[in-house]
Image: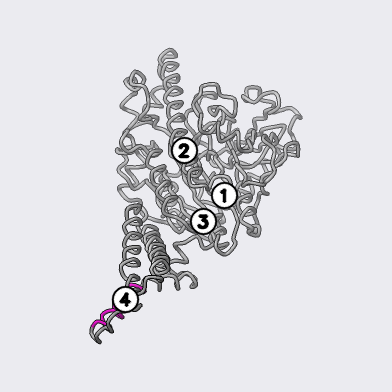
């Protein structure tokens, strides 16, 4: 039966076209390269489906053969050409065998080759205080999605960041070193704009993302915050990188273009398009960073919002410091309420990412971590936002780890841990060797062990401070205080979590004070050594506007 093989032509062509249309329907202008790979994968699957369907149809028709006329030479040539075209998409499958080939990059090649390492998803929420999360004791009902996630995760009750603001905190996390060894640090007395131009991750420090990509992970990042821009070194090790700081800063302050919504939509597009496993995806939400203006804020609260915040938040803050006590107290309460609405908003959109992972069947087997880069001061010690101090409300952060299915871990770990340990944990889960010279160990999965000593440094506003946090004490050091002789604050973490009773001058933590002073001097020496090789780039007008909108720069 010579005409039956011609069924191959329409069925394989139809399958290929159907795959192309389906792939393009899921394409995203945000991820053009990933969209192209996804479309080719869908085309290849469609072609294969057409080929299989042809075989099934031929089997059905095999018993109904009828004699046919011998085709002419012209008809035979056309038929051969048509068959060649119909079979040509099969060449795509050959690329699945070649490293770097189209289908090798598009399809779930790791799974096909028996690579069962977990996908790794990091969800960082900028400036999120631990005490505003229900799982950490808040009764305000701001974080239902994080609280539900916490019930399936390990909650680290005493996780501490390496710095009081984003760049050194996340730089230390990804590099698993101290901030001074990881990023260009702010120098006291330095002009803000000059620093923001040169602030970056050191180019010679290996990052978590680079380690995972070298180990065969596909890597993606959907971020906000100008200090996480690709020009500052965060693109390293990331196959598909986006940072929304290039968007119109005014649009990011409106309900139609809010950062949390943008991050979620783009992250969901990445998840839908990426079929390659194992993968690493990092999403960073700018909410609840200042200025506080969640699109979901109740209108009666929104009407009280001072317009000056959008353009001169620093000036507004300085004016409030000198305002009468009653007026100052009213504005402080307003800040707390607006911040709470931002927390609620970030939780809503982070919940959508978790829901998508569950819908796609990628949730149970994945290592998923939700955390914050630092907390937020709401006037507990007189200051506001972050980058000003090393107090509990700034350095203690939420850290929730949902382990891959089959990994045994306690529901709560109470001992002190360094936030940077989650990077070592991710590398361990991926089967990567430890990074050379790392300062942290993987997170403990059992409660009751000895806690870590967490060194923190990096002030963005005011004189330099450092801190050392242990299970028993928090020590804060101001090297430039007392005419350069330095000054300490010491708090008992077991009985004074609010850090109200300073024990400096007692013998409670004399050894820790000496230890912190030595670590501070080591960090200062590292900064001096690094200063000569710090990268220098020009700040664009868009970056300048973005930083002004966030309050880092003034007019």
Per the rendering, the mark at residue 102 is none
Mark in the foreground, 1 or 2: 2
Residue indicated by mark 2: 350
**Chief secondary structure of the magenta portion:** helix
Q: Which numbered disc flags the more N-terminal residue, 3 or 4?
A: 4
Q: Is residue 213 visible?
A: yes
Q: Which numbered disc flags the more N-terminal residue, 1 or 4?
A: 4
Residue indicated by mark 4: 3
* Above or below 377: residue 123: below
Left or right relative to 433: residue 384: left
Q: Which numbered disc flags the more N-terminal residue, 1 or 2?
A: 1
Which one is in front, 550 or 345? 345
Q: Are discs 3 and 2 less than 8 Å apart at CB?
A: no
Residue indicated by mark 3: 202
* Above or below 71: residue 101: above
Give the CA distance from mark 3 to mark 1: 10 Å
Q: Which residues are magenta?
A: 75-87
Q: Which numbered disc flags the more N-terminal residue, 3 or 1?
A: 1
Mark in the foreground, 2 or 4: 4
């Amino acid at each position: 039966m010579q005409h039956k093989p011609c069924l191959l032509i329409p069925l394989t062509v139809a399958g290929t076209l159907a795959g192309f249309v389906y792939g393009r329907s899921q394409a995203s202008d945000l991820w053009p390269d990933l969209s192209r790979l996804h479309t080719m994968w869908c085309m290849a699957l469609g072609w294969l489906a057409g080929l299989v369907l042809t075989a099934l149809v031929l089997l059905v028709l095999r018993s109904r053969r009828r004699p046919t006329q011998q085709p002419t030479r012209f008809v035979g040539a056309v038929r051969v050409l048509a068959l060649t075209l119909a079979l040509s998409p099969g060449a795509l499958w050959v690329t699945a065998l070649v490293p770097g080939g189209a289908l090798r990059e598009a399809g779930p090649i790791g799974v096909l080759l028996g690579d069962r390492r977990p996908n790794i998803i990091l969800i960082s929420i900028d400036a999120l205080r631990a005490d505003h999360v229900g799982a950490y004791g808040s009764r305000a009902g701001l974080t239902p999605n994080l609280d539900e996630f916490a019930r399936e995760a390990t909650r680290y009750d005493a996780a501490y960041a390496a710095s009081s603001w984003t760049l050194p905190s996340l730089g230390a996390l990804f590099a698993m070193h101290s901030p001074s060894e990881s990023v260009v640090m702010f120098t006291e007395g330095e002009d803000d704009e000059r620093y923001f131009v040169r602030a970056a991750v050191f180019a010679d420090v290996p990052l978590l993302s680079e380690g995972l990509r070298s180990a065969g992970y596909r890597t993606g990042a959907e971020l906000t915050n100008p200090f996480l821009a690709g020009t500052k070194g965060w693109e390293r090790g990331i196959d598909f990188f986006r940072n929304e700081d290039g968007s119109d800063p005014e649009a990011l302050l409106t309900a139609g273009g809010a950062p949390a919504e943008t991050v979620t939509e783009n992250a969901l597009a990445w998840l839908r398009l990426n079929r390659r496993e194992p993968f690493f995806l990092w999403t960073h939400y700018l909410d609840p960073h200042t200025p506080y203006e969640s699109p979901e804020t109740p209108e009666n609260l929104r009407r009280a919002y001072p317009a000056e915040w959008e353009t001169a938040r620093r000036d507004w803050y300085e004016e409030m410091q000198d305002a009468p006590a009653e007026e100052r107290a009213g504005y402080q309460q307003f800040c707390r309420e607006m911040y709470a609405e931002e927390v609620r908003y970030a939780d809503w959109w982070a919940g959508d990412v978790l829901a998508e992972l569950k819908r796609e069947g990628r949730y149970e087997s994945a290592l998923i971590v939700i955390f914050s880069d630092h907390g937020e001061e709401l006037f507990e010690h007189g200051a506001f936002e972050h980058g000003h101090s090393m107090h509990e409300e700034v350095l203690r952060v939420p850290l929730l780890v949902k382990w891959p299915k089959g990994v045994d871990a306690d529901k709560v770990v109470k001992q002190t841990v360094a936030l940077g340990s989650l990077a070592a944990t991710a590398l361990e889960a991926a089967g990567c060797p430890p990074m050379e010279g790392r300062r942290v160990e993987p997170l403990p999965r059992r409660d009751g062990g000895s806690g870590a000593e967490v060194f923190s440094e990096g002030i963005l506003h005011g004189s330099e401070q450092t801190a050392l946090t242990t299970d028993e004490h928090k020590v804060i050091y101001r090297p430039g205080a007392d005419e350069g002789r330095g000054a300490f604050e010491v708090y008992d973490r077991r009985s004074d979590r609010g850090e109200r009773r300073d024990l400096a001058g007692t013998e409670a933590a004399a050894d820790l004070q000496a230890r912190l002073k030595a670590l501070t001097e080591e960090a200062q020496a590292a900064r001096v050594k690094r200063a000569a090789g710090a990268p220098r780039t020009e700040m664009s007008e868009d970056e300048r506007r973005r930083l002004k909108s966030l309050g880092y720069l003034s007019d």
